[in-house]
Image (spheres, rainbow, N blue to C red):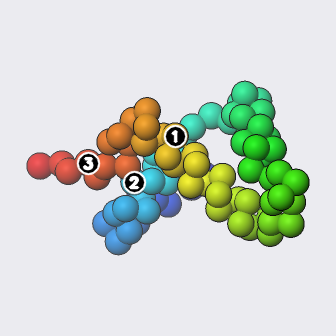
Amino acid sequence: DPLPFWKEYQSKFPCLSLIARRLFPIPVTSAAVERSFSAAGLTITERRSSLDPSTVSDILLVRSIQNILEHKPNFFSLIVLS
């Protein structure tokens, strides 16, 4: 379970810890997988069929983050506890 690891190291890696603690609890569903395949299909076209798999992965990651920020602009904001 990666969550205890990130809780332990949150002072050393505050930004990474926040991202990990926000993303790891998201449940995996078939709908999300279907959306990912759909997005990949829209990314890899005839003109872009020779894209390196890591490039496709990077494009999909950026699109996912954009989508998250459109719906929840403060998703990656640091929580400051007083």
Q: Which mark is residue 27?
A: none
Percent x, y of residue 20: 49, 54
Would you name the residue on which mark 2 appears? 18
Residue 72 visible? The answer is yes
Residue situated in front as seen by the camera: 29 or 70? 70
**As shown in the figure, which amino acid type bears the numbered disc 1?**
Asn
Residue under the point 28% across and 52% down: 78
Residue 51 spot, x, y in % from top left: 80, 66
Residue 8: x and y, percent?
41, 62
Q: Amino acid at mark 3?
A: Ile
Q: Mark 3 highlights which residue?
A: 79
The answer to which image quadrant residue 53 occupies is bottom right
Q: Amino acid at mark 2?
A: Leu
Residue 3 seen anywhere in this rendered image of the structure: no
Element on which disc 1 rests: helix
Residues under labels 2 and 3: Cα distance? 8 Å
In the picture provided, is 74 more to the left or to the right than 70? left
Crowding at dot 2, Cα within 10 Å, few <14 / some 14-19 / many 20+, comes out as some
Q: In the rendered image, which residue does mark 1 sit on? A: 67
Compared to 19, does 67 lie above or below?
A: above
Residue at image point 51% right, 48% down:
65
Pointer 2 and pointer 3: residues touching (CB < 8 Å)? yes
State the residue in front, 4 or 79.
79
Q: Earlier in the sequence, mark 2 or mark 3?
A: 2
Q: Secondary structure at mark 2?
A: helix
Q: Residue at coordinates 31% horizontally, 49% vertically from top-left? A: 77
In-front residue for pair 44/21: 44
Question: Disc 2 or 1, which lies upstream in sequence?
Answer: 2
